[in-house]
Image (cartoon, rainbow, N blue to C red):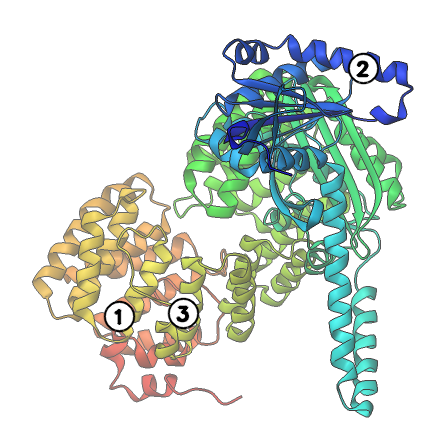
Amino acid sequence: MADGPSSDVRREIGHVLFIDIVGYSSFPDSKQRELFECLNEVVRGTGQVQAAEAAEKLIRLPTGDGMALAFFSSVDAPVRCAQEISRKAVDLPELRLRMGIHSGTVEEVADVNNRPNVTGAGINLAQRVMDCGDAGHILLSRSVADDLAQRSKWQPYLHELGDVKVKHGLGVQLVNFFGDGFGNPELPGKIVRARKARRLRISVWAAASLFVLLCLTISSWVWTRRSALTTAYKASIAGIPEKSIAVLPFENRSEDKANAYFADGIQDEILTRLSKIADLKVISRTSTQHYKSAPENLPEIARLLGVAHILEGSVQKSGDSVRVNVQLIKAANDSHLWADTFDRKLTDIFSVESEIAKGIAESLQAKLSGREQQELAAKPTNNLEAYDAYLRGVAFEARYYSSFFLGDLEKNALSFFERAVQLDPNFALAWARLSRANAALSLGSGGTEVWRDAAKRALDNAQKLEPNSPETLLALGYYQYRGLRDYGAAKTTFGGVSKMLPGSSEVPYALGLIARREGQWDQSIAYFEQALALDPRNVELLSNAAWGYGWHRQFPAVLKLYDRVLDITPNDPTIKAAKASVYQAEGNLKEAATFLPEVNLQISSSYAFDTKIIQLRFERNYGEAVRLLQARLTQFHYATQQDKAFEQVTLALMQRLASDTVGAKVTAEQARDTLEPLYKDQPDDWASAAALSQAYAVMGEKALALKLAERAITILPSSKDAVNGPGLEENLALIQAMFGENNRAISTLTQLLQTSYNSSFEPWLITPAILRLDPLWDPLRADLAFQKLCEEKKP
């Protein structure tokens, strides 16, 4: 039989919208006809269909329980049509539709009745895309989404779903299309099931691989090894409390991507409520923020965080409404213990946070005291605008503690907390956070009175409103520690708060910082380890714990902690430089150099740049060090004039080592001209006093140099600050060495070698290796007593 005439077949790109009535086959015939007629009426009433038909750019194809619309105009046409249909279907609850859109090659043919029809891969793939959805979904193929993404107006409605296997094993990349009043923001059931199956396959594959490996080993070794593995596995499981949970970042499903702060805030508030339950181990947000909202490797994440359960969630904010989805998962077998969806008005958001926390506690069978039940149900403010400002402030505060960009705290977090208390002067929680942010800024070298006073004013307001709340007491503890440097009072305050916030890493972290300032180094390290159990992937906490070990000369422990940090942030230049400084302190310059590649003069990490300069100083490559410092001072934008003056002092010392006495004096005078007025305005600024003493020393002003170095020690003695105080004694020893007072300098260095502290200008603190390497100590090198200090003590 001859084939039909080729003129009946026309191939071109079609933009296909496939529509299906969900549950169609379960209805009786009469109902099916009614639903199909309703669908036809909705479709015919859309502007896109009417316009395309008028332009003869549309072919409609019945498909039994739905239809396919092939547009031959633009990719926008089926998308706009799906929007219209979805919005109209909202008022027709019985018409439950799912839709799929794909652009591809279609063949326009004439059917047996000589009516236009279409077939081909474009039609087939559009149906496959639709088949992946549930009622309400509008799913797009990757090619359609890429075309739409070229126009900014579509971007907020495109939500990646990833690759999905469809019929015949074909992989299709899907995008969920939804927004205000159209589409379905929920993950399609097929994708949820596929992800769970993928997790199961990975677990099965891993188990099978281990079994095969064991079987290939010598029989006696197999049984010995199996016994060891079983023991280790049981110990690992036994070490993770059953009543433990990590709350992963909530996915922001709002159309406005700027609403991400709101999703972060809801997660943070739920965590805060959970941390008040003594019967739960709760991992802090700083450790969970590195993960996706719905990752595939939940068992591995749970193992790294040391928990038995994971909470996943999403937040969709639209106008005055909010939808929060949560699911509690047992990580060991990826089973869902509890899930719920909350569709509420924003005015009810606090009850949502409370209900979620209670649902988790009930699911994990955590016992709640009467006070804990009250804490879970607390409503911090009745002013939603104030609460919104508060959440924005919390988001910027979190950014500051992850990047230490001062603007996030000083300009952004503070302004939003201030806005929150302006809108609701009775918002105690916002007053407490405002006090804490100001107290953090007051901890600078100058002990800035402006920030300290602002912290006190905010604290006073919080105490008037809720004097015994854990948030107010935290603010009091930080004010005592950072603002007043009253470590004894701060320790008492934080000790009391620890009973109210048993699941918070913040309290042992603060106690660790305070113990370190008091010179209680072993106790400080113990507190840090306690905090890390609740916050194991907190980069700031890991780094601070590393500093504690380093200032205590426990360098192997420092390297292990930095390796944990680099596992989280592999390319962090500050952490790499910190590892280099460990090797410098141990005298291994070759190893240190591997962590200090070519330094960009605009590098934002001043620590990385300074560590490079120290490396060049130890290598006695003064010319390169001077070149880099001079270029940096010319090109880099310093946060303050004080920071620039500190860099000028470093350059002056390096020029002096390079025997450029004239250049060194000129540079030192420039630093002096900046530092003198700063010190005059803030006579308690120990850092400016120390830097100014070095500038005077380079200028040859012995009396002024020694006077300022001694003044710095008076401002911040070791008895007041065991971390930075001894570093000022080291600074005095340097100036004494520069002016030939060898005995006094060596006496101080002898004591410092037995002291844990933070050096003013060396990597970490004085070590025998540093004394051997650093040319700053060359004036002492011929002295036999100094030579003995350079000898490594045998353990």
Q: Residue at point 31% right, 79% down?
A: 773
Provide the secondary structure element on which disc 3 rests: helix
Give the side of residue 758 with respect to residue 68, left or right. left
Q: Quadrant of residue 436?
A: top right
| Mark 3 or mark 1: whose residue is earlier in sequence | 3
Pair 1/2: label in front = 2
Q: Are marks 1 and 2 in contact (CB under 8 Å)?
A: no
| Mark 1 or mark 2: whose residue is earlier in sequence | 2
Q: What type is the residue that disc 3 sits on? A: Ala
> On the image, numbered disc 1 is attached to which residue?
616
Q: Residues within 10 Å of mark 2 (few under 14, many from 20)?
A: many
The answer to whether one can see residue 243 in this image is: yes
Place of residue 48 in the rendered image (x, y in percent of width and height, measured from the top left): 56, 13
> On the image, numbered disc 2 is attached to which residue?
35
Q: What type is the residue that disc 1 sits on? A: Leu
Q: Residues within 10 Å of mark 3 (few under 14, many from 20)?
A: many
Give the side of residue 245 with respect to residue 611, left or right. right
Q: Is residue 257 above or below residue 492?
A: above
Q: Residue at point 49% right, 29% down?
A: 148
Q: CA distance from mark 1 to mark 2?
A: 79 Å
Q: What type is the residue that disc 2 sits on? A: Leu
